[in-house]
Amino acid sequence: MSLSDLADQDRAKAVAASWLESGRIPHAILVCGADGTGKRRFALELVKAVLCIEGSPFSCDQCPTCRKVDSLQHPDLHTAMPLPPRRGKREASPEALRDAVVEFLAGGANPPSNANIAVEHLRQLQKELSYSPTESPRKIGLLFAAERMHSAGANSLLKILEEPPARVVLVLVATAPERLLPTVLSRCQRLTLGPLSVDSIRRQLELEGVAGERLELAVRMGAGSLQRAKEVAAGEFDETRRLVEEFLAAGAAQQDEVYWNILGELGGDRGEIEGFLLICGQYLRDLFLLAHGQGEAVVQVDRRAYLESASGTIDAARAALEIDRAAETLANNASPQLVLTDLWRSLRRGGQTSTMPPEASLAGARRK
């Protein structure tokens, strides 16, 4: 596969093609976008196109150079990514690091939340890039999940970014570019990948044998992310959906003990609660769509009967507004538990509230 063969991302591919055709390739490129939009593959195909001496403007995808890049065996390509702590040390051999990146590129899971790009790896990368290329016109440093660099590690790259050696290109891949140091971000040319098209996601899932309501559910819940769509197809969100339905039903009846049970099942983890709130939002917007005669647009296509039964007990318009407010509040780093509590209090039709004490809610926390 070459860059031209990738689905969607026409704008990013056109920008990359203009760089490659002119030979004026930026010394630092940031490939960013949401999870599941193809950043890993796009970045690798871009690297392949830069190093290939046969293809124009994209890689030929057949020469020894392209095959070496695909297997990460090219001597002018050096990679780094977050690795989990290894018995308190952040060291790993170049071979182990390469194996981890190969697995990651093959569709491996995102690095765990406690993983960061080790300072030692970045310093080694900087050292390797200081040497002249051996087989291709340029040397390339490729960093996945670049936002996982600590400040010390990012600062170690500033010399390359501020005074780039001739023939060196840095390619950074990030889901959350705003977490990069401003001094790093300002020195990169950004390629932002947008959501994948519905047709692209559907075709890929069909090739993997997904069909029927599960296919349609995965496409809709995926919301432009192939990674998320595959997770939905594999049933990874089924338990969260069950909890959401239990939460909504009990919230309409203001059965406070159910709220505390669900919070216990979520474990108080911020990421878990944010994911739970995201699916709550999908359900509530589905209820809103049903109430306004747009049932064909609902996301939870396999739960239509549940949605129709719930529409009479939940004030979806009010709760959907609360979901929007919750997303804004979470962006300001509020406690997700308190955000969840305020959503709970909004579910009862007619604005009736639960017996939950006000200090348990975000509004209560603000009054204190």
Image (cartoon, rainbow, N blue to C red):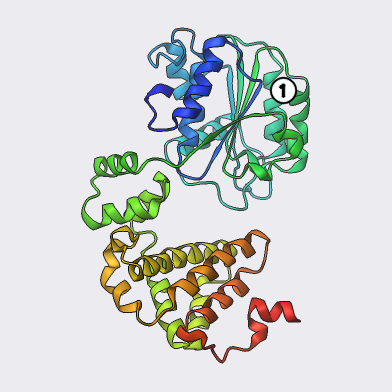
Name the image quarter holding the C terminus.
Answer: bottom right
**Amino acid at pointer 1:** Lys
Q: Is residue 73 visible to the viewer in this orientation of the structure?
A: no
Q: What percent of the width, then of the height, locates residue 120?
A: 71, 35
Locate residue 229 relative to residue 12 in the image: left or right.
Answer: left
Establish if 256 lies above or below 331.
Answer: below
Residue shown at the point (72%, 77%) measured from the top left: 366
Residue 214 visible in the current orientation: yes
Q: Indicate the quadrant where residue 23 lies.
A: top right
Q: Which residue lies furthest to the left in this view?
A: 212
Where does residue 203 sit, x and y in percent of width and height? 28, 40
Name the residue carrying label 1. Answer: 127
Q: Nearer the viewer, residue 352 or 362?
A: 352
In this rendered view, identify the residue nearer to me: 207 or 219.
219
Q: Is residue 154 above or below residue 330?
A: above
Element type at mark 1: helix
Question: At 62% across and 48% down in the image, what residue appears?
Answer: 115
Q: Which residue is more in the foreground, 190 or 66?
A: 190
Q: Is residue 178 left or right of residue 57?
A: right
The spot of residue 309 in percent (x, y) is: 30, 78
- Say which residue appears at 41% left-offset and 79% top-offset: 314
Q: Residues within 10 Å of mark 1 (few under 14, many from 20)?
A: few
Where's residue 68, x and y in %?
46, 18
Quarter the N terminus occupies: top left
